[in-house]
Image (cartoon, rainbow, N blue to C red):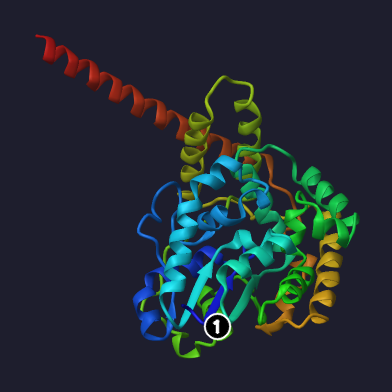
Amino acid sequence: MAARIILHIGVQKSGTTFLQHVLQANADALVKAGVRYPVSPDWARGKRTVANHEWASYGLLGTEFPWVSQDRASEETSSWQTLLDDVKSRPGTALLSAEALSVIRTPAIHRLLDALGADEVEVVITARNLGWALPSLWQQHIRNGRSVSFERYLTGLAAERERGRDHIETDRSAHLWRAFHLGGLAQRWSDAGATRVSVVTTPGKPPHLLWQRFAEAIDLPSFAEPPTMPTDRAHTGLTAPETLVLSSMNAAIRQTSWSGQNADLIRQAVTARFQSRAKRGNKVAAPPEWQARLAEWAEEDLATLQNTPAHIVGDLEDLRHDPSTEPAAPPTPEEIAQAGAEAALALAAVALQETLIQRNIRRLRHRLTT
């Protein structure tokens, strides 16, 4: 079995999908370098864009993840067993990547480590500063169908954070801060028995810098320039005006009788149209009155992190939030109107395409009956 297992546990919005693309594209070359990244033959099922091990982890830890039902966990039991058999059937080093593992509590960490049964389990955490991560999380929240304002979203996070470390460590619903309070995350895994915890910082750009630091963290500096470096951006976020338009759309969709599947199709069409635009407006940023709070949170987390056994790869300055670098003005009415017009065009394109298909079906039926 693998004597050494490396767990890349995220966190979300820190370049995890990019790293997984690099790992998947270079799986064969990595084996020659002594590290195996298992790629399941059925990884492409569902909506995944890249192979990772999150769904398999549902089969072991199930409802430890707040968004996973018992039925969904049961569906993934065989996926977990396949992955575990793969890891245990081959010697050397195995690398698994699942950003959801950043939210699990200490008992679940013990279950995972016991199940893996390796002599060495190293943990790698990739991280960006809260001033970038929280806006990105909110716009992803909107892309998933919500309509809560950024102000209300941050207010909820603040209230949860103020309940303290015991709440974050034990309450199943406090999963966001369990991941994004980096000091607590590193200490939790270290206390649970990880042989080494590394925190890889990233400023976001250039992406190859993140890979180079990641290669250093997994003790593979010779792979700092992998044979294949994907150029496609797996996740392109929405801008501030686009997010506001989509949020309003989500609120309106809830007043209809559309199925969840149809609502998802509409959102996908609109976001695809947004991402094809040349001029899209400024990125999502926290409201000005929240900027100082985000900077304080980042400083608190950084101080906690520095008191853990975590090995830092990169620059700790990457984890600080500088409010002066954020857009000073909210989206203008004109920018919001332009994004709204693009959303309308996306919906018109869907409607026209459906009309054309229906017309062709009628023509085909007519020919078959004459």
Determine which quarter of the picture holds residue 312. Answer: bottom right
Task: Evaluate whether residue 98 shows in this view.
Answer: yes
Residue at position x 82%, y 47% in the image? 156
Eyeballing the image, is 142 above or below 360?
Answer: below
Side (left or right) of 195 relative to 157: left
Side (left or right) of 114 relative to 225: right
Q: Position of residue 138 (x, y in %)?
A: 68, 49
Q: Position of residue 306 (x, y in %)?
A: 80, 81
Side (left or right) of 44 relative to 277: left
Eyeballing the image, is 32 above or below 241?
Answer: below
Q: Position of residue 358 (x, y in %)?
A: 29, 20
Hey, what amino acid is under mark 1? Ile
The residue most toward the left is 370
Residue at position x 64%, y 43% in the image? 142
Front in this rendered view, residue 303 or 248: 303
Front in this rendered view, residue 103 or 120: 120
The residue most toward the top is 370
Q: Position of residue 99 (x, y in %)?
A: 60, 62
Quarter of the figure with the C terminus? top left
Local SS, label 1: loop
Eyeballing the image, is 174 above or below 18?
Answer: above
Determine which quarter of the picture holds residue 86. Answer: bottom left
Task: Evaluate whether residue 14 shows in this view.
Answer: no
Question: How crowded is the residue under tag 1: few (<14 C-alpha within 10 Å), some, or many (20+)?
Answer: some
Image label count:
1
Front in this rendered view, residue 12 or 153: 12
Residue at position x 46%, y 45% in the image? 272
Mark 1, residue position = 218
